[in-house]
Image (cartoon, grey):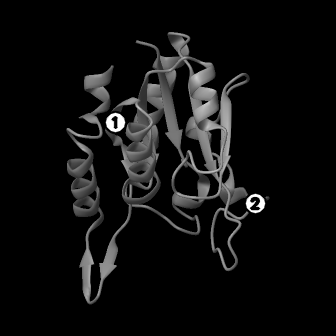
Amino acid sequence: MRTALLLIDIQNDYFPGGKSELTGAVEASMNARRLLDAFRLNKQPVIHVQHMSTRPGASFFIPGTAGSEIHDNVKPAAGEITIVKHYPNSFRETTLLDKLKQLEIEQLVVCGMMTHMCVDSTVRAAYDYGFKCILASDACATKDLQFKDQIVDAIDVHNAFVSALSGMFAVVKCTDELL
């Protein structure tokens, strides 16, 4: 089965000092880097997804800013595909589906940021398009969320979304299991 690594939105604004810092971004990016190194070593396809905010009032991932750049821990190498997107779902109004079909990809190893938003949206869409997905749970990061007057800790947000994806939409593994 032909497999590609899909790295979603591992961009500077999500890291310490960025405009929308996530909990565990550095650690998640280091696990993503381990996966990236393995895919490169085995000459397997790698696809980076980069979010560029075009909606009025956006506060991060502003085109042309350092915050919108892919983080150095997973910087694309020559020949690796980068897909630019403007919505949480990496397939929406992008060439991702066409690229995956062109490469004859059947399975995706997915990692990135944010677990509850772009990772979730993309994994569900990939499933709908017929791809088998493996989610590298420790190579993903998110942030605390608030619902009414309750703060939901990032770890609980992450675990809730990973558990919701597990089974139906993806096989969930940690980086060590995948390597």
Residue 74: horizontal and vertical position, in percent? 57, 36
Numbered circle sitting on residue 51: none
109 displayed left or right of 70: left
**Amino acid at circle 2:** Pro
**x 58%, y 69%: residue:** 19
Residue sitting at x 44%, y 21%? 106
* Three-letter residue code for mark 1: Ala
Q: Residue at x 60, y 54 (%)?
A: 12
Name the residue nearer the viewer: 162 or 90: 90
User: Label 2 belongs to which residue?
Assistant: 63
Relative to 5, residue 137 above or below: below
Q: Is residue 77 above or below residue 104?
A: below
Using the image, determine if residue 56 lies above or below residue 87: below
Q: Which residue is mark 1?
A: 136
Classify the position of the N terminus by image quarter.
Answer: top left
Q: Position of residue 2 (x, y in %)?
A: 46, 14
Disc 2/disc 1 C-alpha distance (Å): 28 Å
In the image, residue 43 above or below residue 21: above
Q: Where residue 72 sits: x, y (%)?
A: 62, 41
Q: Quadrant of residue 100?
A: top right
